[in-house]
Image (cartoon, coloured by chain):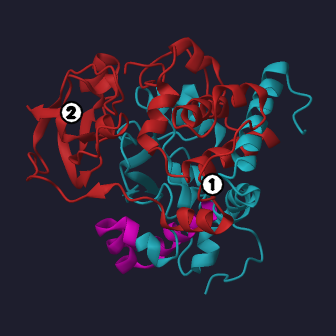
Chain colours: A cyan, B red
Amino acid sequence: MSDDHDHSELTEVAARVRALETLLTEKGYIDPAALDAIVETYETKIGPRNGARVVARAWVDPAYRERLRADATQAIAELGYGGRQGEHMAAVENGPGVHNVVVCTLCSCYPWPVLGVPPVWYKSHAYRSRAVIEPRAVLAEFGVTLPEDTEVRVWDSTAEMRYLVIPERPRGTQGWSEERLAGLVTRDSMIGTGLALPAEAAPSGAAGAAL
Amino acid sequence: MNGGHDLGGMMGFGALAPERDEPVFHTDWERRACAVTVAAGACGLWSLDESRSVRENQPPGQYLAKTYYDVWITALEKLVVAHGMVSAEELASGRPLAMPQPPPRQVTPARIAEGIAKGTRYDRPPAAAAAFAVGAPVRARIINPAGHTRLPRYARGRQGEVTAVRGAFVFPDANAHARGENPQWLYTVRFSARELWGPEGDAHSTVTIDAFEPYLEPA
């Protein structure tokens, strides 16, 4: 196994995972191919590029942004995203003087259809404990320093609502295509621990250059 | 329960350590742990609420010492035994000793694809009118249920304001313990950081939670 080099505790967990997998497949509860399908879905199909498309659409299309405000689940479904752990979506918008950041202090609730599987730091005890009590210090550790009078709105995902942050559109991107804009939207900017990348960060020669 | 999972406001866990270009899974066992948990859930014998309840229902020291997917796997071991899918003897040996009769409806790739695409909605028709409207001042009740709850300790007793009425949703406190879905109105409630944390709270920050109606009283 790939984790043979890990310490014995991890090897012990790996054995327990294998036992569960063996028992549930051999007893007929789960087709082994279903396990591969889950891994493939979250490793290759569902991830933060989905959310980036939602954000880019909101940046270029005011009517879409309105629909996102009114019913985010429906607006996100327009782009073909939804389902498991994104059944009840809300979009929260950054703007002048307002910055949003999302956490789940009780477990690890996260909008999977638009962001994929949560990163390790999002599930960490440090993030879950600190984001609500000292959000500015947490943001600073991600390299985000906000003006002191900017309101930081922390969203603790304590029920089945899932939150997607709509970061501010970077300056100097007038006339950019949605596809090129989406390249500026990072996963962290949609959780709120980052900002969208500046225009200069766009890959050179990207399709849909400025009109 | 006032468990080790209820982390909001705790201290001592150190700095954040975000990883650049992080892989979706770090090891093969984590990849398989995620997949087997999702697939076992798709068998439909337990709810997400029960699953969360089992994950958090362990001594806080143990919860905090485990890695993320170890918490999942520890809970899955309990769930498959509690729901009769696997016996304790089978779990210990890792080998099936008896086949289920009648054979279960197998979780297939097609069922997984459908389940991921459709998800499971948790909103339900409300049984009564909502008690609170947007703008209402509310106080989170001081409650300490022994079972599952989604009212974090840091909000209990604190005053906030309703900023959204989300509709009626399955009530985790009941559903986690086979007491039915008992749908309740769900509100987004905003608290000032000063209200939650006192003078150490940030003067320009707020924290919102999503709170079920039984968690709230008029303020």
Q: Pick out the residue farthest to the bottom.
A: A211
| The stretch drawn in magenta includes residue A161 | no
Q: Nearer the viewer, residue B93 or A69?
A: B93
The quadrant in which residue A34 appears is bottom right
Residue located 56% across and 20% down the image: B63
* Residue stretch in magenta: A48-74
Q: Is residue B218 visible?
A: yes
**Badge 1 is on which residue?**
B103
Determine whether the residue tagged by mark 2 lies in a helix, strand or loop.
helix
Where B52 falls versus A36 (above or below)? above
Where A126 falls versus A188 (above or below)? above
> Which image quarter holds the C terminus of chain B?
top left
Determine whether the residue tagged by mark 1 lies in a helix, strand or loop.
loop
Residue located 36% across and 33% down the image: B177
Tell me: A5 left or right of B135. right
Which chain contains the residue that carries disc 1?
B
Q: Position of residue B214 (x, y in %)?
A: 18, 35
Question: Neighbour class for label 2 at 10 Å: few (<14), some, many (≥20)?
Answer: many
**Badge 2 is on which residue?**
B215
The quadrant in which residue A119 appears is top right
> Which image quarter holds the N terminus of chain B?
top left
Give the residue type that dot 2 points to: Tyr
Residue located 10% across and 43% down the image: B136
Give the residue type that dot 1 points to: Pro
Q: Nearer the viewer, residue B108 or B18?
A: B108
Q: Disc 1 versus disc 2: distance between alpha carbons?
A: 42 Å
